[in-house]
């Protein structure tokens, strides 16, 4: 496939930034989206140009690090996946693809497509944990019976990988989906229920800060 990429380039947080066109040829439909960007970056480096900065880590859809707004959609045109799980077969020869960073005041651009998501970390620090003594006398996890329903619900909430797509997609840049997931994954279990009220108050307060 031959494609035209329109990519947001921004030197640093203070730079105004702009869209830059990059034609790319011989893209295999079996490539992942990030592999396609790897190919582009190799070409840019070989030409002595600055490669495009983008976030990634596991490339397995589990860490939540990848974060691209592709053709106006967080994580692109596929469904229920992260950017690293998007494949080029979702596009066709001759397509123009717009690639932008998450756009939200709480996620300022660091460089090109990389944004600062430490706002999420501040919310987690405010209550996304349980206070437990881990000095060697920790109770066996299975000593507390938990219903299958509660375990399933908590697991669903824990599936939030903190990617930030909900904030980037919401017109008000609300972090409520993220906070709701992080509150619920603990509050639904007996170990987390003890501090549930304090946790939700502290996390919502930090979200609103
Ligand atoms: S709730 Fe938001 S941050 Fe969590 S996985 Fe879903 S889109 Fe990503
Ligand atoms: S790089 Fe880890 S979820 Fe995409």
Image (cartoon, rainbow, N blue to C red):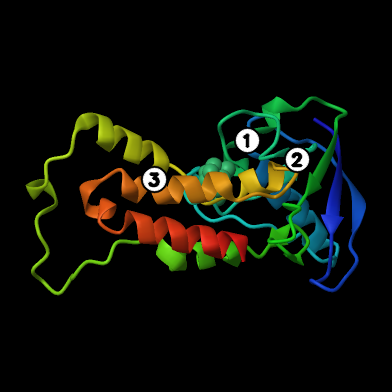
> Are the residues at dot 2 and dot 1 in contact (C-beta closer than 8 Å)?
yes
Q: Which residue is mark 2?
A: 70
Distance between the Cα atoms at labels 2 and 1?
Answer: 10 Å
- How many residues crowd around disc 1 within 10 Å: few (fewer than 14), some, or many (20 or more)? some
Left or right of 150: which side holds 59?
Answer: right
Question: Marks 1 and 3: which is nearer the front?
Answer: 3
Q: Which mark is residue 184?
A: 3
Lower sequence index among marks 2 and 1: 2
Residue 121 can be seen, yes or no = yes
Q: Which mark is residue 10?
A: none
Q: Residue at x 63, y 31 (%)?
A: 30
Lower sequence index among marks 2 and 3: 2
Question: Marks 2 and 1: which is nearer the front?
Answer: 2
Question: Marks 2 and 3: which is nearer the front?
Answer: 3
- How many residues crowd around disc 2 within 10 Å: few (fewer than 14), some, or many (20 or more)? many
Secondary structure beneath disc 2? strand
71 over 208 or under it: above or below:
above
Secondary structure beneath disc 1? loop
Q: Residue at x 75, y 40 (%)?
A: 70
> Camera-side residue: 160 or 44?
160
Residue 128 can be seen, yes or no = no
Distance between the Cα atoms at labels 1 and 3?
Answer: 28 Å
Lower sequence index among marks 1 and 3: 1
Quadrant assignment for the N terminus: top right
Residue 7 is situated, as x and y percent measured from the top left of the image, at 84, 50
Q: Which residue is mark 1?
A: 86
> Camera-side residue: 96 or 118?
118
């Amino acid at each position: 496939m031959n494609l035209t990429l329109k990519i947001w380039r921004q030197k640093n947080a203070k730079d105004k930034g702009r869209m830059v066109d990059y034609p790319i040829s011989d893209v295999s439909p079996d490539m992942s989206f990030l592999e396609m960007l790897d190919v582009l970056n190799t070409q840019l480096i070989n030409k002595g140009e600055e490669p495009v900065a983008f976030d990634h880590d596991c490339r397995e859809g589990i860490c939540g690090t990848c974060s691209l707004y592709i053709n106006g959609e967080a994580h692109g045109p596929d469904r229920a996946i992260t950017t690293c799980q998007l494949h080029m077969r979702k596009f066709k020869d001759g397509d123009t693809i717009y690639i932008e960073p998450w756009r939200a005041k709480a996620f300022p651009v660091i460089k090109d497509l990389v944004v600062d998501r430490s706002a999420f970390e501040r919310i987690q620090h405010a209550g996304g944990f349980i206070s437990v003594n881990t000095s060697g006398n920790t109770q066996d996890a299975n000593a507390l019976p938990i219903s299958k329903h509660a375990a399933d619900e908590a697991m669903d909430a824990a599936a939030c990988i903190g990617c930030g797509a909900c904030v980037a997609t919401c017109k008000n840049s609300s972090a409520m989906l993220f906070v709701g997931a992080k509150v619920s994954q603990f509050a639904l279990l007996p170990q987390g229920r003890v501090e549930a009220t304090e946790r939700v108050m502290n996390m919502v307060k930090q979200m609103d800060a």
